[in-house]
Image (tube, rainbow, N blue to C red):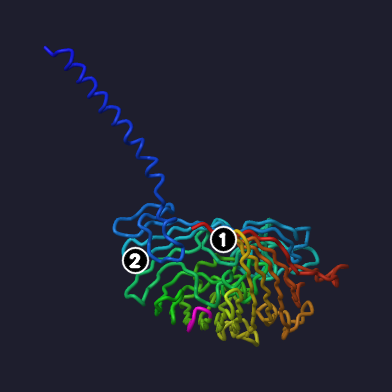
């Protein structure tokens, strides 16, 4: 039989164990909360991976973490090309991209980005009295015993071509899928990429300072091509440098994403489907002798559409899709950047398609250039104030202009130029947020062939401004 003294000691010992068991986990929480996260402990300028990344995601066994990032762009502004029926002032979300990427092994890397906003490509127009719409299927495919292409009453008259649209984004997508690829690193300098990817054709439109599709030069919009294929990449890194000394890419891909720039609407079939049996190819190289100077060049060879002999149509035919692009970027001072690019495109029907259609021309050459100057100055609270100006001059040469000029329609002639001058002012709040304003001064020699100005009726000779301005918000969360 236990004594009262032993019973009291047993009770006190039991209470002590219970109390410590309850307090120790609770006390550990504040101690852990006071420890700095790996993201805050590692300066942004360091390149080593943090020991315990704070970004969302979970670590894969034996690899770096599965990372999730997001980017958003929206704007409100005026586009004179959409003044018909009073649609010139609009607010749109340009993109809302969610990206997931990771490295399951040291040699394997994957990247998937999704964007539900996909408004870039033209739709079949329903037309309007007194107007010419190049995307009107009743005009394009009249008399053909081919696919029945109904018009789109909601946006067909507004998503017309490269001169009239509603999108703020310029990148082609496969539905909501923007990019999805796998990289296999064979050596320290050689990588193979497979899947849907952005092609290295010229400077990226946003890296070059453009805010939206409304203020981006036409050359940047044409070059913003994404497609399904394989790319072999060589990059020679330099210690202490932010970019490789030399990078070279060789790609083979489907090549149908931008066929509507040359008015090859091809029955408005999905542009991510390959209508041509031959693959397109692209070779590109960049050379950066210093961090302040970079040269780029690219050559593309390919085709769009297909020669359908049972349904001969100029607007659904096999077309050339070649490009030569060369550009340079230079920072004479830390807060000043100068950029420029020259491009030459070979479009138009192939020789065999021209023969089948009975037209006297085949290849069509379109060339031009753009140059840009940008400056920025750090202010207070990590904010940066900047401005840029871009000027573009490019041939108004494509299959539509060639066809209308040859048939003496709507006053269209060859040899004319498109010109664009875009002025931008922006404030960067850190590296994540940009607030911007743009204003463009456009010269479109033929607004009447994009449904912008009437081709008949009392307003036929009225002036139609295609100038644009707007405000933009862009946010990136890594």
Query: Looking at the image, which residue is at 48% across and 64% down?
Result: 179
Q: Residues within 10 Å of mark 2 (few under 14, many from 20)?
A: some
Q: Position of residue 74 (x, y in %)?
A: 63, 58
Task: Name the main secondary structure of what is drawn in magenta.
Answer: strand
The residues bearing labels 1 and 2 have C-alpha atoms spaced at a distance of: 31 Å
Query: Looking at the image, which residue is at 51% across and 81% down?
Result: 300
Query: Looking at the image, which residue is at 43% across and 54% down?
Result: 55
Per the image, the residue denoted by label 2 is 108
Task: Tell me if residue 136 can be seen.
Answer: no
For the image shown, how many numbered marks are present on the structure? 2
Task: Tell me if residue 424 can be seen.
Answer: yes
Magenta span contains residue 278:
no
Answer with the quarter of the image where residue 135 lies.
Answer: bottom right
Residue 359 drawn above or below residue 199 = below
**In front here: 267 or 288?**
288
Secondary element at image label 1: loop
Q: Position of residue 81 (x, y in %)?
A: 74, 66
Q: Position of residue 281 (x, y in %)?
A: 47, 79
Magenta span contains residue 291:
yes
Query: Looking at the image, which residue is at 64% across and 60% down?
Result: 435
Closer to the observer: label 1 or label 2?
1
Contact flag, marks 1 and 2 (Cβ < 8 Å): no
Q: Position of residue 208 (x, y in %)?
A: 59, 73
Per the image, the residue denoted by label 1 is 430
Secondary element at image label 2: strand
Mark toward the start of the polypeptide (1 vs 2):
2
**In front here: 192 or 257?**
192
Residue range highlighted in magenta: 287-292
């Amino acid at each position: 039989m236990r004594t009262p003294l032993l019973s009291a000691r047993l009770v006190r010992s039991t209470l002590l164990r219970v109390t410590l068991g309850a307090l120790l986990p609770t006390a550990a929480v504040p101690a852990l909360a006071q420890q700095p996260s790996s993201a805050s402990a590692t300066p942004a300028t360091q390149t080593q991976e943090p020991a315990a990344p704070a970004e969302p995601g979970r670590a894969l066994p034996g690899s770096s973490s599965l990372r999730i990032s997001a980017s958003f762009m929206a704007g409100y502004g005026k586009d004179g090309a959409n003044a018909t029926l009073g649609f010139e002032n609009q607010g749109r979300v340009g993109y809302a991209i969610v990206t997931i990427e990771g490295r399951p092994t040291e040699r394997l890397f994957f990247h998937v980005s999704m964007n539900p906003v996909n408004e870039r490509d033209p739709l079949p127009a329903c037309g309007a009295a007194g107007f010419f719409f190049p995307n009107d299927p009743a005009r394009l495919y009249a008399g053909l015993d081919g696919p029945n292409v109904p018009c789109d009453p909601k946006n067909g008259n507004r998503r017309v071509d490269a001169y009239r649209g509603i999108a703020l984004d310029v990148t082609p997508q496969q539905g909501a899928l923007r990019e999805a690829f796998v990289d296999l690193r064979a050596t320290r300098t050689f990588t193979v990429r497979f899947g849907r990817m952005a092609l290295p054709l010229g400077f990226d439109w946003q890296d070059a300072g453009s805010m939206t599709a409304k203020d981006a030069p036409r050359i940047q919009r044409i070059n913003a091509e994404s497609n399904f294929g394989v790319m072999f990449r060589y990059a020679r890194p330099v210690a202490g440098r932010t970019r490789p000394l030399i990078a070279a890419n060789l790609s083979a891909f489907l090549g149908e994403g931008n066929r509507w720039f040359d008015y090859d609407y091809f029955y408005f079939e999905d542009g991510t489907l390959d209508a041509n049996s031959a693959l397109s190819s692209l070779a590109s190289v960049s050379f950066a002798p210093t961090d302040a100077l970079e040269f780029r060049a690219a050559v593309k060879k390919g085709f769009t559409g297909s020669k359908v002999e049972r349904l001969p149509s100029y607007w659904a035919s096999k077309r050339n899709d070649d490009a030569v692009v060369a550009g340079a970027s230079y920072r004479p001072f830390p807060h000043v950047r100068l950029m420029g690019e020259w491009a030459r495109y070979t479009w138009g029907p192939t020789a065999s398609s021209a023969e089948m259609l009975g037209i006297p021309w085949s290849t069509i050459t379109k060339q031009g250039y753009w140059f840009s100057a940008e400056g920025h100055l750090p202010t207070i609270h990590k904010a940066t104030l900047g401005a840029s100006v871009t000027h573009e001059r490019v041939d108004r040469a494509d299959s539509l202009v060639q066809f209308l000029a040859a048939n003496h329609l709507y006053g269209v002639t060859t040899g004319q130029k498109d010109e664009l001058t875009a002025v931008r002012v922006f404030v960067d709040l850190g590296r994540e947020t940009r607030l911007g304003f743009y204003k463009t001064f456009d010269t479109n020699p033929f607004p009447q062939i994009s449904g912008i100005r009437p081709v008949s009726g009392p307003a036929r000779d009225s002036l139609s401004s295609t100038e644009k301005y707007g405000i933009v918000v862009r946010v990136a969360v890594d």
